[in-house]
Image: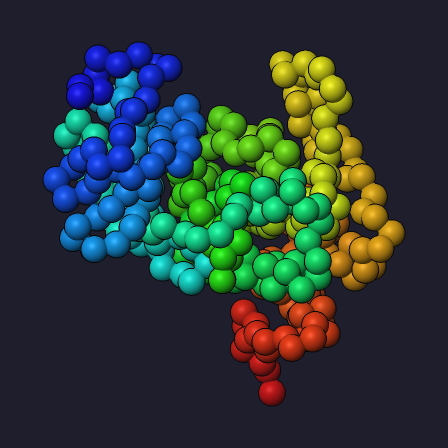
Amino acid sequence: MDGTQRSENQGWDFEEGDEIVPGRFALARLGASDTFETYLAWDEGLSFLVVAKLLRPHLTVAPRPLASLAHEAELLERLAHPVLVRGFGSVLDGPRPHLVLEHLEGPHLSRLLRTHGPLPSEQLYPLAMDLCAALHYMGRQGVVHLDVKPRNVIMGVPPRLIDLSIAHTLEEAQRIRGLFGTDPYMAPEQCDPGRAPIGPLTDVWGLGATLYHAVAGRVPFPREEGFDPSDKLARFPQLDNWPLPLPDEVPGGLVEVIFQCLAEDPVDRPTAADVAVALEPFVTALPDHVTLRLLRPRVR
């Protein structure tokens, strides 16, 4: 099929067994966005299940989406961490440009929260530590994720942070002038480019919003029903409001950490390593906990 002849509301419509490229076969459609479609696929070379993340048919020759796909492929090749999704190659030319990603077992954190409500402490604290480790690593590699949110966390063992489609290097992040991210999880400097530098502390804000959602079952800065999307303060209440109070049963130390992550000014936020240090007592208090090595060496 020729992707250049398809309209914007059409997808690939692969059926089970259809060939994506030689040696890689679609099995089931997993999801779609305005830019991508994802399929569970069988890769003969790997002899394993993978996820094929394809540009939608009408974008297969569009320069900007192709450049974005190539950039994500480069970052996947560059980054290697136990809590980050892995890439297994890419096809950047031809009729079906796509990435090959590992297939992860487990639900999205967003689905767990919708179905079961706030996370119990036995899940919450190890998850927080794992996300801190991934964000600390990315920052040291000079990369910011810019879309840390429950939808981008797969609750496997260990949990995985996925989707690098809008990740930037730190150098690229300094030139951002548009809006990148998911509204309720965007730091103020993402909502209002130029307000403050975008960097690793931007991802710490997304971490704070994600942990808030995980303990409260709601976002920290809800929008009013029927808000005007053209009104920046209505669309991004985090620009001019305090987060709603957390439930009384949330430990005070955890509340403090989360609210520090959600500070308006990046310089007032802890680093990902600082968050891990602050959460260590909660992890060690869990029954049958696994002792985690923190993100910086002990000083004797």
Which residue is most to the right? 248
Q: Quadrant of the C terminus?
A: bottom right
How many numbered marks does the figure carry?
Answer: 0
In the picture, measured across the screen, residue 113 lies left or right of residue 135, that is: right
Position above or below: 111 against 180: below
Q: Quadrant of the N terminus?
A: top left
Which quadrant of the view contains residue 288?
Answer: bottom right
Q: Tell me, what colour scheme is on the image?
A: rainbow
Position above or below: 286 against 42: below
Which residue is most to the front? 16
The residue drawn where x is 16% and y is 53% is 45
In the picture, measured across the screen, residue 28 lies left or right of residue 227, that is: left
The residue drawn where x is 67% and y is 70% is 283
Image coordinates for residue 25, horizontal then vertical, percent: 21, 40
Q: Nearer the viewer, residue 28 or 55?
A: 28
Note whether residue 49 is visible.
yes
The residue drawn where x is 28% and y is 25% is 12
The residue drawn where x is 41% and y is 23% is 34
Q: Nearer the viewer, residue 90 or 274?
A: 90
Q: Nearer the viewer, residue 298 or 100?
A: 100
Image coordinates for residue 165, horizontal then vertical, percent: 40, 38
Which residue is most to the bottom? 300
Image coordinates for residue 74, horizontal then vertical, percent: 28, 46
Image coordinates for residue 113, horizontal then vertical, percent: 65, 44
Note whether residue 136 is visible.
no
In the picture, measured across the screen, residue 195 lies left or right of residue 85, that is: right
